[in-house]
Amino acid sequence: MIEVRPFDRLGRFRNAWLNARHHFSFGSYRDPARAGFGRLLVWNDDEIAPGTGFDPHPHREMEIITYVRAGAITHQDSLGNLGRTEAGDVQVMHAGTGIVHAEHNREEVPTRLFQIWIEPDRAGVRPGWEARAFPRGQGLRVLASGRPSGTKDGAAEDGALTLFADAAVLAGTLAAGETTVLRLDPGRAAYLVAAVGSVRVNGIAAGPRDGVAIAEETEVAVVADTDAELVVVDVAAE
C-alpha cells in the first residue's frame, strides 16, 4: 500500500510568525483518518519567521526529532542544554519524565524544518537532548534510530542519534534520474516526504512536501524525477 497525501491537502495553521502544515492531527487540526501512522504521531512542516519561535513549554513521554531544511533553530531546555542546529542537520529530544524547552529562529532568514514526534517504547526514560551535523549524500542515511543495531536500508546505523523507540529517521539526496531502494522488514511501515523535488515511489508520483504512507511493502524503489532531498521515518506498522 502506497498512499500519497498531497501537500495542499495537509492541515494548516498560520499566525504572525508561524506557517505550519500538519501531516497528522495536531493542535486545532483534527482528522480521524490521520491520527498518526504506527508509532509516528506528528509530522509538522514549519516555517518560522526570523527573530521568533516557540517560547518555553513542557513535554513528557515523547521522542521529538527536528530536521532543519533551511536556516537554523536554536534549542534551549530545562536541563541546561543550548545548541544551534543548521540546515541538513538533526536534533533529538527525549521528553521522558519531563522537560521544558524553547525553539527560536535567531537567524535573519526564515527557518524551515520538519518536527517529528514518535511514541517511545517505554515510559519514564531520562530526558535529554542531542544534535549532530550530517553530511548530505546520495541515497538514504540513518540519522536517528532505536532499531536493533546493524545495517538496514543499505545504511549503517553506527553514529546515528539515539531514539527510545523502535523507529528510525533517514535522510539523503538524489540527483534527477537516480534511484534508492528502501527495504522494510515484515510488520514495518514508512512515511516519506521529499523536502525538495519530485519523486516516484514504486511508480507512484509524489511532489515536493507531499506525504507518502507506505505499508505492506518490503522493497520500495524511490526514483527522483528532479533533484530531491528525502526524509523517511521507518516504524512498526501496528
Image (cartoon, rainbow, N blue to C red):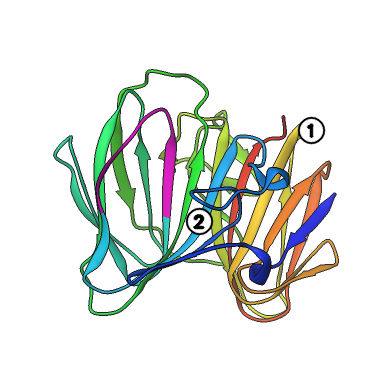
Please name which of the two marks, 2 or 1, marks the residue nearer to the observer: 2
Q: Position of residue 189 (x, y in %)?
A: 72, 41
Magenta: main secondary structure equals strand
Vertical position of residue 210 compared to residue 108: above or below:
above
In the image, 195 versus 19, the foreground residue is 19
Determine which residue is flagged by label 1.
186
Task: Report crowding for label 2: few under 14, some 14 to 19, many 20 or more residues within 10 A (C-alpha).
Answer: many
Vertical position of residue 67 compared to residue 57: above or below:
below
Q: Earlier in the sequence, mark 2 or mark 1?
A: 2
| Magenta-span inclusion, residue 59 | yes
Q: Which residues are magenta?
A: 55-66
Task: Report crowding for label 1: few under 14, some 14 to 19, many 20 or more residues within 10 A (C-alpha).
Answer: few
- Residue that appears at 38% across and 18% down: 124
Inspect the image, locate mark 2, and give the three-letter code of the amino acid beneath it: Asn
- Residue that appears at 85% across and 49% down: 1
* Quarter location, residue 185: top right
Q: Position of residue 20 (x, y in %)?
A: 47, 64
Q: Tag 2, which secondary structure? A: strand
Determine which residue is flagged by label 2.
44
| Magenta-span inclusion, residue 106 | no
- Residue that appears at 51% across and 32% down: 146
